[in-house]
Amino acid sequence: MHDSENLDKIRQQFDFGPYPHFPLEKSPVQDLETLFIHDLTTPYYLKYRRLPPREGVVILDAGCGSGYGALTLAVANPGAKVIGVDLSEKSLELARQRLRYHGIENCEFHCLPITEIDRLGYRFDYINCDEVIYLADDPAQVLAVFAQALKPQGIIRVNFHDAYQRAEQYRGQAFFEWLGLKEHNPEDMAIETVRRVMQELQDEVDVKKHCWQPALGNRSDQAGKEYILMNFLFQCDKGFTPLQVRDFVEMVGLELIEMVHWRKWRLHELFADPENPPAIVAAAEAMATPWERLHLVDLLHPAERLIDFWCGLPQPTQPMTLTPESQIYLHPQLRQERVKLAWQQALQHRQSLALSHFLKTPAQSALFHAEVTLDFIAAAVLWPLLETPMTFTELQTRWQRLYPYDWHTGNPLPPSEIANQLHELLLRLESYLYVLIVEGSG
């Protein structure tokens, strides 16, 4: 991954400031957005239109740091075995302590480079490599190691710093490197020097205007130090374009599944009328490969710090079909107690329910947040999904029993009309992954 000098720099930096710096008691249980991303269900369904295995799931957190990501993976995937690896033994000490504190026992941690995970002897259902691979001398080598350790239908989540979005940040890093502040592993003196320089720059200087967050940078506590280290003194930090990332992925025989925040990478949604972008843009988008579409978005609107995506070994992508026998599931991260309570209150008061209020990630585009709402009838019909999946036919029968009449005319609703309305509702919700539509028993 690195020559020994770079490995030592990275190890020393994270020994000095284990990352991320979250209090031991902090829990992801209420953070539905983070759980949605870390839940294997999300990318597995996107790829295979099925639910992931229920037994024997093994997850790797590659570059686990102080263990908050490993904790999140454990909470999001109950019953899975979570294995963390990291270069920094000090970070791993915190990770072990963190998971013990939260009662997570089915886990283990190892101090080794992520290119040596073959030594662990596992094949993984899910590999999470968050905020790590852009430090590698050879990202393709890292991805190749992951591919070798992956089960045939396994999934990798990985992210690279975006070269366009982070361009000014890299100029700032180059400036402080020129001053000699990155020659040795940065510690308190270098951090304070960066803070003073940034504070004394005029506010209109580009690097300060676009890269400096006073609310964090002016803090002298651990959070302030971490902010400066990760943004201005980060050892081996590099940025990439979507096409460079594509080359790494395809070089080792992996294929893109989807972006983690996929709606933020939709080219047509950058235009005033997303349904009718300029004809030349629509034509270019239609002819472009998935990676090329991401590149076009990045050229126009590089708003995302990370090129954050799921990939895996080449496997047929399953189409989604909705039949009378299809099993309808609510996404696991919507089957939470606070969602149930809000759903129940909506039914009691005969009100609508905004699912996008609870789970924003799949409804968030680059420039706006979609409102995905269940009216009172839809909320009542789908209510049992909070506890158990149902077939399309069972939901249709429930709708017919609860609301058999057209409220406007008072006439009975024909089964075909109820089926059409239910079909339209489920397809809309499935496009946001609020419901999952699976053939057979899943």
Image (tube, rainbow, N blue to C red):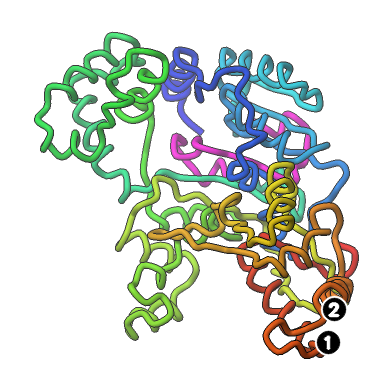
Amino acid type of the residue that numbered disc 2 sits on in the rendered structure:
Gln
In front: 173, or 210? 210
Vertical position of residue 264 compared to residue 406: above or below: above
Could you tell me residue 209's position as x and y percent?
18, 38
Which quarter of the image is occupied by the C terminus?
A: bottom right
In this view, which residue lies farthest toward the top?
A: 189
Direction from residue 307 to residue 48 in the image, left or right: right
The residue carrying mark 2 is 400
Vertical position of residue 321 compared to residue 307: above or below: below
Q: CA distance from mark 2 to mark 1?
A: 7 Å
Instruction: Specify start and end residues of the magenta stretch as a single range.
Output: 116-143
Task: Write the residue at 38% across / 31% down.
Answer: 236
Q: Residues within 10 Å of mark 1 (few under 14, many from 20)?
A: some
Residue 436 visible? The answer is yes
Question: Could you tell me which secondary element the residue under label 1 belongs to?
Answer: helix
Question: Could you tell me which secondary element the residue under label 2 belongs to?
Answer: helix
Task: Write the residue at 36% across / 44% down.
Answer: 239
- The numbered disc on residue 415 is 1
Could you tell me residue 244's position as x and y percent?
41, 55
Could you tell me residue 187's position as x and y percent?
34, 11
